[in-house]
């Protein structure tokens, strides 16, 4: 059983954040929301483990 990684796990978080912001460049609010939804689904698929996903959802609601 995998466990949700909550410690820093990105070597260059500022660079990743800049990529995320750049990906939204030129999008309307509606397009940006749709992009976020698609990105979430892609990442959930990558994780794959329902228990890890449930843990992440719980953490995000806090």
Image (cartoon, rainbow, N blue to C red):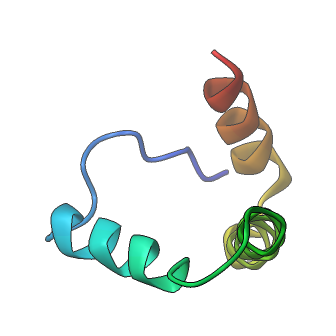
Q: Residue at x 29, y 41 (%)?
A: 7
| Residue pictured at 69% horizontal, 47% vertical | 52
Please state, as top left, top right, bottom left or bottom right, where the C terminus lies in the image: top right
Vertical position of residue 21 compared to residue 50: above or below? below
Whether residue 9 sits left or right of residue 6 in the image: it is: left
Residue at position x 51%, y 84% in the image? 23
Where residue 60 sits, quadrant-wise, is: top right
Position in image of residue 31 (x %, y %): 79, 75
Q: State the residue in front, 10 or 22.
A: 22
Tell me if residue 45 comes above or below residue 30 in the rendering: below
Task: Report whether 3 appears left or right of 11.
Answer: right
- Asked whether, in this view, residue 24 is left or right of residue 20, the answer is right
Residue 36 position in % (x across, y down): 71, 66
Q: List the single residue furthest toward the top.
A: 62
The answer to which of 23 and 47 lies nearer the viewer is 23
Residue 24 as seen in the image, left or right of residue 36 = left
């Amino acid at each position: 059983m995998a466990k949700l990684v909550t410690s820093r796990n990105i070597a260059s978080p500022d660079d990743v954040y800049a990529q995320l912001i750049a990906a939204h460049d030129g999008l309307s609010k509606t397009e940006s929301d749709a992009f976020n939804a698609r990105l979430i689904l892609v990442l959930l698929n990558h994780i794959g483990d329902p228990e890890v996903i449930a843990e992440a959802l719980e953490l995000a609601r806090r």
